[in-house]
Amino acid sequence: MNAPHTPALHPDFSPAASSPHEASANWLPFTANRRFQTTAADRTMVSAQGNYYTNASGHRLFDCLSGMWCCPAGHGHPKLVEAFTQQAKTLDYAPAFQISNPQTLRLAQRITDMAPKGMGKVFFVNSGSEAVDTALKMALGYHRMKGEASRFRMIGRERGYHGVGLGGLAVGGIPANRKMFGPLLMPGTDHLRHPWNPEQMAYSKGQPDWGADLALDLERLVALHDASSIAAVIVEPVQGSTGVLVPPKGYLQKLREICTRHGILLIFDEVITGFGRLGTPFAAQYFDVQPDMITFAKAVSNGVVPLGGVIVRDEIQQAFMTGPEHMIEFFHGYTYSGHPMATAVANATLDLYAEEDLFARAQKLTPVLQEGLHSLKGTPGITDIRNIGLMGAIDLEPVAGKPGLRATQVFEKGLQSDLLLRFTADTLAFSPPFTATESELAQMIDSVKRLVTQ
C-alpha cells in the first residue's frame, strides 16, 4: 500500500469515459444517491487487480472488504479470467429446467463434498437473496410433505440480514430494510433478540465468553406460538451486514438443541461466512454445529459471476421425491439457476482456493487482523471493536443528531486516500482478501487510525 499521508494515485491510471449525465441515470442500491452525485469520481471504480481497486479520481485503494465480502482471492486472477473465457466459447448458456450442464453437475458434487456430512444436495440460484427465499420455500414444502402443514411460521433474528427478497425481508431484522414494505411481508414471522450486549461483550476477541443463554429466547417464541406452528429458524452464524456481531460461545449449539427438540429446521445463512471466511469451508464446521440447510453465494465464484445456492440435508430433498417419476417435485427455480458461466468460474474458484491453500492463509491472517484492529482500542472516536476469523468491525462515535454521518465521512476520506472501506450506520466492517499480506493489513490499520482521527 501507499505511504499513509500520500494520495494513492495509480501510475497507470486512465479513467473510463463517463459523464455527470451518465452518473445521474443510475439509481444505485443501498446508496445515498444524492451524495453520490457530488462525489461520483471518487466512488466510481474503473479497474481492479489483486487486492486493489482504482477509482476514477486515480486513487489506488486497498480492498478492505473483499469487494462486498465476495472476492477473497482478489481481483483479475488469470485462472478465473481464463475459465470465464473458455466457458463462453464452449457453452455460454443452457436451460436449467429439465436440462443441466457438466460445470453445474460437477460444482454441485464438489460443494456437497465440502459441506457438513449428510448435506448432499444443492439447489443453485443467482444470489444470496434468492438462496434465502428458496430455503424458506423448502422449509414450508418439507413440513407440508411430512403432513405438518401447520408449520408455517419463520423465525429470524433482530439485526439479521437475509437479502432483499420478500421472504428474506420478512425474516430479516434491520428496521430500515423492512419498514417501507411491511404490507408485503410474510405473515406469522417473528424474531429472536440479537445476541450482542455491549456491556458484556465490548472489545471481544473472537467469541464472547458471556451470552450462550441468549439462545433461550427461542424457547420464549416456542411458548408464545407453539412449536407445531414453527417451520424454521434462520440465522447468520456471524451477523455480517449489521456490523459483524459474533455469537457467544455455546449460543449456536443451544439454538441447534432447541430446534431439534421441537422439530424445527435450522437454516444457516452463510452468504458471507461460506467458503473460507472463518478458515473453514463453512461456519457450520467452524462452530461445530450442524444446520439443516446452508445458504451460500458471494465467495463461491469469487464475485466474478453472480451465483448462489442452498445446501440441504438429504432427508429434506427426499421428502419431495414422491408421486410419479415424470412429475415436477418442487415448483421453484430461476432462468439462470446453475448458469454454466457462473458454475465454470465457481469450479475454477474452488480450484484456486485449493491450489493456493487460501483457507489456511485466512487462518494465518486471522490473528494479524485481530491484533491490528484491537490495537485501535483507546483511539478517540472508536467505541467498540470485535472480530472473528478474517472479519471484524469498529464502531464509531456518532455525530450528535446525525447517525451514519461519521462513518460516511471516514469512507469518503478513504476514497480520496488509499482505502475502499465498507460501512453500515456508524460501523466500519473489515473482511480483507485471503491474499492480503501482513504488511498490507498493518498499513490498512494505520490508515484507518489516520482517517478516524483526522
Image (spheres, rainbow, N blue to C red):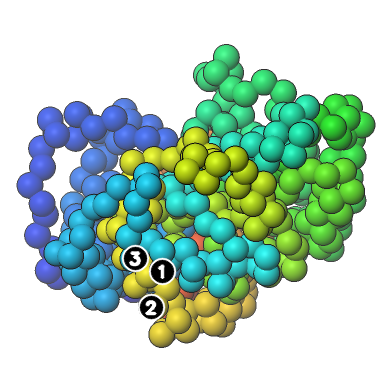
Label 2: element kind: helix
Q: Amino acid at mark 3?
A: Gln
Q: How many numbered callouts?
A: 3
Residues packed near mark 1 inside 10 Å, few (<14), some (14 to 19) or many (20 plus): few
The residue type indicated by label 1 comes to: Arg
Position of 183 with respect to 408 (left or right) is: right
Report the residue marked by disc 1. Answer: 106
Question: Tag 1, which secondary structure?
Answer: helix
* Residue 107 x/y as whole percent: 43, 66
Amino acid type of disc 2? Leu
Residue furthest out toward the right: 223
* Residue behind mark 3: 103
Examine the rendered structure and indicate whether residue 241 appears above or below residue 35.
below
Q: Position of residue 333 (x, y in %)?
A: 44, 40
Above or below: residue 238 compared with residue 447:
above
Which residue is drawn at the image coordinates 64% and 36% (left, top)? 141
Identify the residue at image location x=78%, y=38%. Answer: 193
Of the 4 image quadrants, the one containing the C terminus is: bottom left
